[in-house]
Image (cartoon, rainbow, N blue to C red):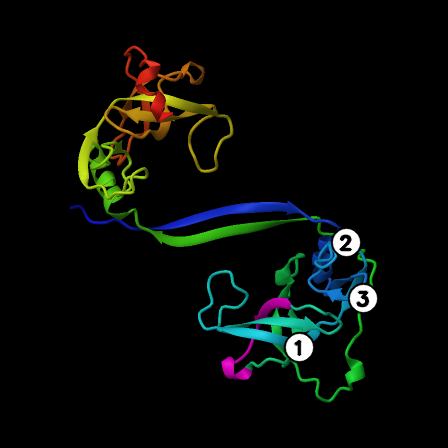
């Protein structure tokens, strides 16, 4: 049995969204060291602000400014910060109800250790030196001793127009997930066979279908599969699509064709790129074969074999 494979994998994409007047004012305000919330019809002040009342669903546009000081309502200690978190040393995640607000804001608290954090402690905003109109303009919260101040010094929310020069109108959120992926026993064997220019699937002991790539179990019968069956290398195009948008970091000129290919002897179609033929001549039933490049562990693409097209009845159940 070949060694079960594993490898680090990163999935990342930028998500771009436009901002309405409320979120635009909130993020632009952070850039200007101003914390804004919204006042609901019944007088509650929500920070961070939302565009619709979560209780009544009424639209909210009444912006107010709250204080950069507040009270910790609950917290959790983060002993091992990860990449892109607010601080690179251990810190506390805290919910802070800013003075003048009725809801809490989630952010980081810079504290010496978990013994220095408690519910009810007073904190204040530490502003980032460089601000661009993002929640990270609040670098973190820090402990704040206001014991010498009168309770009347705690700011009440004041009306704010939400107008700033050069407002922020959109943001880009870069979602990223890092993890270790293992294809498991069945697919590790499949990948090992591909390195030898072979396609190997596994047969279900009940329905006798051969699955390529194998998953280790039959998706129809739910039974484990272990009998290996070599299929192909030739196959039939069952269906396809024409790609007209060039993918980032993919050195393939558009338009090109991606197709589902039923390899001879397989009970499941796999997908691969079709080459060696104009994109507008690819068709269902086209007979194809793999093309391997030097030192490649998998086929670069599939090309026509020159055989007559397969009869529809031979692959219709694999569509």
The residue carrying mark 1 is 71
Q: Residue 33 falls in which quadrant of the image?
A: bottom right
Per the image, label 2 sits on a secondary structure element best described as loop
On the image, the x and y values in percent for residue 292 come to 26, 28
Report the residue at 76% width, 86% height from top. 149
Extent of the magenta region: 105-116
Q: CA distance from mark 3 to mark 2?
A: 13 Å
How many numbered circles does the render carry?
3
Picture layout, residue 121 above or below residue 105: below
Q: Quadrant of the C terminus?
A: top left
Please say if the residues under marks 3 and 2 sit with CB atoms less than 8 Å apart.
Answer: no
Picture layout, residue 74 above or below residue 245: below
Picture layout, residue 232 above or below residue 168: above
Q: CA distance from mark 2 to mark 1?
A: 28 Å
Q: Name the foreground residue: 250 vs 124.
A: 124
Q: Residue 317 falls in which quadrant of the image?
A: top left
The residue carrying mark 3 is 43
């Amino acid at each position: 049995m070949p060694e079960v494979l594993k490898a680090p994998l990163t999935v990342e994409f930028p998500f771009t969204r436009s901002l309405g007047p409320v979120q635009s004012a909130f993020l632009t305000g952070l850039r200007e060291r101003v914390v804004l919330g919204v006042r609901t019809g019944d007088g509650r002040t929500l920070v961070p602000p939302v565009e619709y009342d979560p209780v009544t669903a009424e639209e909210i546009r009444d912006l107010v400014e709250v204080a950069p000081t507040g009270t910790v309502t609950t917290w959790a200690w983060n002993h091992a910060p990860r990449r892109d978190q607010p601080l690179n040393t251990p810190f506390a995640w805290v919910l802070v109800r800013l003075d003048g607000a009725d809801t809490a804001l989630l952010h980081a608290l810079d504290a010496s250790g978990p013994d220095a954090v408690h519910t009810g402690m007073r904190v204040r905003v530490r502003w980032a030196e460089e601000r661009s109109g993002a929640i990270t303009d609040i670098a973190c919260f820090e402990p704040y001793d206001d014991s010498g101040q009168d309770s009347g010094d705690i700011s009440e929310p004041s009306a704010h127009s939400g107008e700033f020069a050069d407002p922020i109108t959109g943001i880009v959120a870069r979602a990223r997930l890092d993890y270790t992926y293992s294809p498991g026993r069945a697919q590790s064997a499949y990948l090992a066979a591909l390195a030898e220019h072979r396609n190997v699937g596994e047969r279900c002991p009940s329905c006798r279908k051969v699955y390529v790539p194998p998953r280790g179990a039959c998706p129809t019968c739910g039974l484990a599969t272990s009998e290996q069956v070599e299929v192909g290398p030739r196959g039939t195009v069952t269906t396809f699509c024409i790609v007209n948008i060039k993918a980032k970091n993919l050195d393939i000129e558009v338009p090109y064709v991606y197709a589902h290919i039923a390899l001879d002897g397989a009970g499941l179609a796999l997908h691969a790129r079709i080459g060696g033929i104009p994109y507008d001549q690819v068709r269902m039933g086209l007979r194809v074969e793999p093309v391997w490049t030097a030192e490649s562990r998998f086929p670069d693409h599939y090309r026509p074999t020159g055989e007559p097209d397969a009869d529809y009845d031979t692959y219709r159940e694999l569509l």
